[in-house]
Structure formats: structure tokens, C-alpha cells
Image (spheres, grey):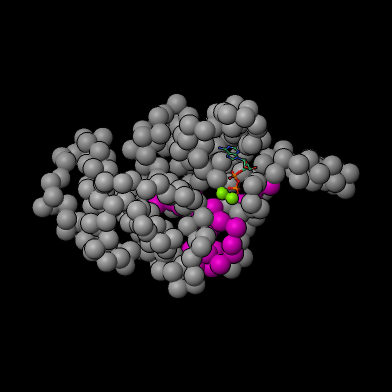
Amino acid sequence: TPLLQVNDLRAKIVESNVDILHGVNLTVNQGEVHAIMGKNGSGKSTFAKVLVGHPDYEVTGGSVVFKGENLLEMEPEERSLAGLFMSFQSPVEIPGVSNDLFLAMAYNARMKKLGREEVGPIEFLPYLMEKLQLVNMKADFLNRNVNQGFSGGERKRNEILQLAVLGADLAILDEIDSGLDVDALRDVANAVNRILTPEKSLLMITHYRRILDLLNPTHVHVMVTFNLLLIFNIIASFEFGICMIHGVFTFDYWN
Ligand code: ADP
Ligand code: MG
Ligand code: MG
């Protein structure tokens, strides 16, 4: 069975009642690396946020099954504990909470959920240092408040550190490459590659091609807006007698 199965997912913005997702289909199997590309405003972030249960959006149709369970019925925290991780395009600052404390709390919440023993600081620190090395970050990073005063690159790296510490069966990285210079991008991509073990899956959202060369996706999808889809449908039905009903096109990536 697939790790993630999205069928005809529809969603709207709660506040304005505007429909954004018009029937998205996506299947992610264990070990696959998927990229979703598409123009700004096409709904990529909305899709990711709907998957993790962001309260700004309401699902109006379709289904999402994650590890055999109905993801849409879970609270956001349950989704994360079930093994879904998401880095946000604009990660939040958490004043007053240091990075290491935040990571320890998040890690122990997961251990508790998995029915394992929580770990104390003496055990957690070496584990954390190992992960820190993996993502190539300095230790002074840990004493700083979560995301406060971080540069763009530091934020991205911190998200990857969170992923490394918490682990996830499916990581969703939303524009992990935006605002990074070439060196920082390579660093972040290397870190992601080191974290990704063969049985882990990745869904990355981007509108740059650069990161595709670094992360070697197994599948690439392009999200298009509803208007574009309508136009495409009209042309396609005249030209080829077919009609696309999905919000996501998929093609094989040639590398
Ligand atoms: P992308 O990530 O592909 O750039 P988004 O998912 O961020 O696209 O946005 C898709 C569309 O939905 C855009 O027109 C955006 O303005 C709108 N949108 C998304 N989230 C909200 C929100 N919380 N409030 C108002 N409009 C939103
Ligand atoms: Mg955008
Ligand atoms: Mg976006």
C-alpha cells in the first residue's frame, strides 16, 4: 500500500470561502522523492498545509490516506506524531524557547506517543550533537531562541535539523530552496540527502529547478491553477479528445 494516497482533494480558504484545490491526486510510496513545481499562487503551499491540517483551510472533498489511516480526521499534532513532517515557507519565531529545549520537548512528545521511554538531557544531548553534525550546524545554534534573529539560510537549516531530530516517514519541504545562495542551497540539500534513508519519503515544493539536480526526485509534478486547467481542458478536448480532470500533472524527471 502507498505511504500517502491523495484522491480528488478539494479545499477552500475558511475566511474568504475561496476554493483553492480543485481535485488534487497524488500517490507517494515508501522511499520515493516527489517534487511539486508550479507557478506562484498555483496552490502548492495550500496543498502542503492542508496535508498537515492547517486551520486556515477546510477540506471540501476527496480523501487523504496516510499509512492506511484517514489523515483528514487527525488533529495536526496527531499527523506529525504519525510520521508526517512539514517545514513551513515562513517558519515561526518562538520567543523565550531555546532551540535545544524545543527539540527535546518535540522529541519526547514523539517518544511518548510511540510508547517509548522519554529521554533526559544527558541522553538527548549526544543524540542532538550527532544530528547537528549531520546538518553541518554549529552548537551555538542550540542556545538561541527558535528562529529568532535567524537568517534565511539558518532558518532553513534549522528546519532540516528539526527533521533530523524528530524523524519522519514523509517530510514535506516547502520552498526549502528559496532565498538561499548557491552554497547554502548545496549545504541544505546535502543535509537532506544525509537524513533521507532509503525507506523515507520526501515531498518537496519548489519553483526552482536547481534543487531538483541536488535532490534527484523520482517523480515531478506540476500544479496548475484552475483557470489554466480549464483552458488546457478546452484545447485538449478539441485537439486530442481528452479531458484532464486532475489539478496535478505528473511527468518523469529526466536528469
Ligand atoms: P503557491 O504556494 O503555489 O505559491 P499558495 O498555496 O500559497 O500558492 O496560494 C494559492 C492561492 O491561494 C493564492 O492565490 C493565494 O493568494 C491564496 N491563498 C492561500 N492561502 C491563503 C490564505 N490563508 N488567505 C487568503 N488567500 C490565500
Ligand atoms: Mg508562493
Ligand atoms: Mg508557496
Looking at the image, which residue sits at the far bottom?
A: 183
Looking at the image, which residue sits at the far left?
A: 122
Q: Is residue 106 magenta?
A: no
Image coordinates of residue 80 in percent, x first then y, are: 37, 39
The quadrant in which residue 244 appears is top right
Q: Is residue 189 left or right of residue 126?
A: right
Q: Residue at x 54, y 32 (%)?
A: 57
Q: Is residue 233 above or below residue 11?
A: below
Tell me if I can see residue 6 in this picture.
Answer: yes
Image coordinates of residue 193 in percent, x first then y, are: 40, 63
Looking at the image, which residue sits at the far right?
A: 238
Q: Residue at x 76, y 45 (%)?
A: 228
Q: Residue at x 51, y 43 (%)?
A: 48
Q: Is residue 43 above or below residue 253?
A: above
In the image, 129 versus 91, the foreground residue is: 91
**Quadrant including the C terminus:** bottom right
In the image, 109 versus 113, the foreground residue is: 109
The quadrant in which residue 135 appears is bottom left
Stretch in magenta: 196-224
Q: Is residue 136 above or below residue 232?
A: below
Tell me if I can see residue 193 in this picture.
Answer: no
The quadrant in which residue 43 appears is top right
Q: Residue at x 25, y 50 (%)?
A: 98
* Numbered label tally: 0
Image coordinates of residue 113 in percent, x first then y, are: 26, 35
Q: Is residue 213 magenta?
A: yes
In the image, 216 versus 119, the foreground residue is: 119
Image coordinates of residue 230 in percent, x first then y, are: 78, 40
